Amino acid sequence: MGINLTALGEILGDGEEVLRGLNPAHCDNGLPTEGCFILKAHDLEGPSFAIMIAPPEAQDTSPLGVRQGISPDLFLTLLRRPDYGIAQLNVGSALQHVSELGVVFAQVDDEEWAEHRSAHAMLTGYQTLEPRTRRDLQRFLARLAAEKVLKKPAEKNA
Amino acid sequence: MGEGEIEAMATPRWLTKDREQTEDAVFGLLFGSPTLFPEVSGVSVGGSRSFAQLPNVLTTVVLNTGQVGSIEYIPQAEISRSVIYQRFAQAYKCAVEDMLFAELRTTEMVSELRRKVKDFAKLLPDWDSEGAEAISVETVNTALQVIEHIAIVLERKNTVSAPLVRPFPDGSIFFKWIRGQKELAVTVHGARVEAQRWEPLSAFQSQGLWEIPVGATPEHVDWVLT
């Protein structure tokens, strides 16, 4: 990924929605597993997300989504392959148990997304969590993502 | 019992249907069997497809616990007293299923787990097209040992319950087991085995994350199955 980590941008607020690409190799029956959200203490780059587009009236709760978010259909064209799925997560829900521990979604440009580079966000701050909590978060994100799969990935047996 | 009956009992669908069948209590006769298997001994009215085809004659069977699967017929002459009973067929067939097929299905399930894990060894680096690590031989061998311990517990508990097993992009093998409100995750990476448990399923925080010797796997499997 062409991510410039020194250019970590705005922190996403609780009202923002993010999109996660679902690699078929890490899904089971069309639903994400923990394999979609592997988090390691030594990760330099966290899992990538897209900031989901929000309507103008959501300016107060989702300013980034209004300003530079993208639609799920557009996000699909930015994923590695068309057989990927897409899940939607609310930032506040995703971080409800770890936001006080410094885990955030941060906007960070991804040059590979060209004109949509500013719609890219990354989960970070989890690197300093205790291993147990980091695994708890992996599982929680997988469960949350499974609740709102916008597009199922193609079936694939890894 | 004829051959047709045995075939029927070997069909889980039929057994499941029968198990769910509600049957009213009826008047009948209890046989003077020496309670070899009291929870399933009972009576059945002749003509029932589950038992000897003797129309309008009261017949029964009991399981001989000393020889799994063998059937002992108790003759009509040993009828001892009248009782209110529920049809024998339901409990009897469930018992046969548990005794004869649980072990077979456990064996099949464990074989399937072994096959999957061995297949993980064939995954090349970048098997997920996102830079995933290959699954090392050491990881596969450790996971196979974990499966052996899982099999021991399943056989001891006479239970059929299979965990999900998957390769992870970091080169580990992940077992996940959900039963009721309990969830067990066992992660194998090289020679390292870690167990993590959640209860209830809605909990964010796990009960703990433990690095365990392979031989301690049964303790955690016992937990999730209990």
Image: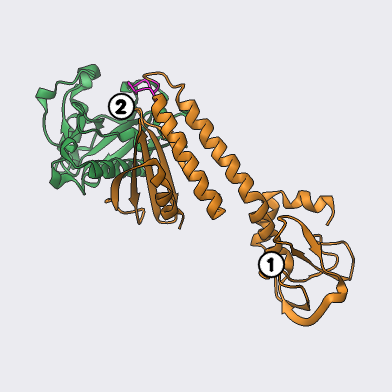
B131 within the magenta span:
yes
B44 over A33 or under it: above or below? below
Q: Which mark is residue B164?
A: none
**Which subunit holds the residue at mark 2?**
A
Label 2 crowd (10 A; few <14 / some 14-19 / many >=20):
many
Amino acid under label 1?
Phe
In the rendered view, does B122 fall on the left or right side of B171? Answer: right
Circle 1 is placed at which residue position?
A: B37
Q: Taking the image as drawn, is residue A108 in sight?
A: yes
Q: Which quadrant is the N terminus of chain B positioned in? A: bottom right
Residue B217, relative to residue B42: is it above or below? above
As drawn, is B88 to the left or to the right of A149?
right
* Residue B134 coordinates in the image, percent (x, y): 38, 22
Q: Residue at 13% of width from left, 41% of height from top?
A: A102
Q: Main secondary structure of the magenta part?
A: loop
Mark 2 secondary-structure assignment:
helix
Residue B191 image offset from top left, x and y in percent: 35, 33
* Residue A147 sits above or below residue B26 on the image: above
Residue range in magenta is B127-135
Structure colour scheme: by chain
> How many numbered marks are there?
2
User: Crowdedness of circle 1 by 10 Å Cα count: few (<14), some, many (20+)?
Assistant: some
**A21 or A40: nearer the viewer:** A40
For chain B, what colour was chosen?
orange
**Distance from the alpha carbon under mark 2 to that under mark 1:** 63 Å
Tag shown at residue A75 = 2
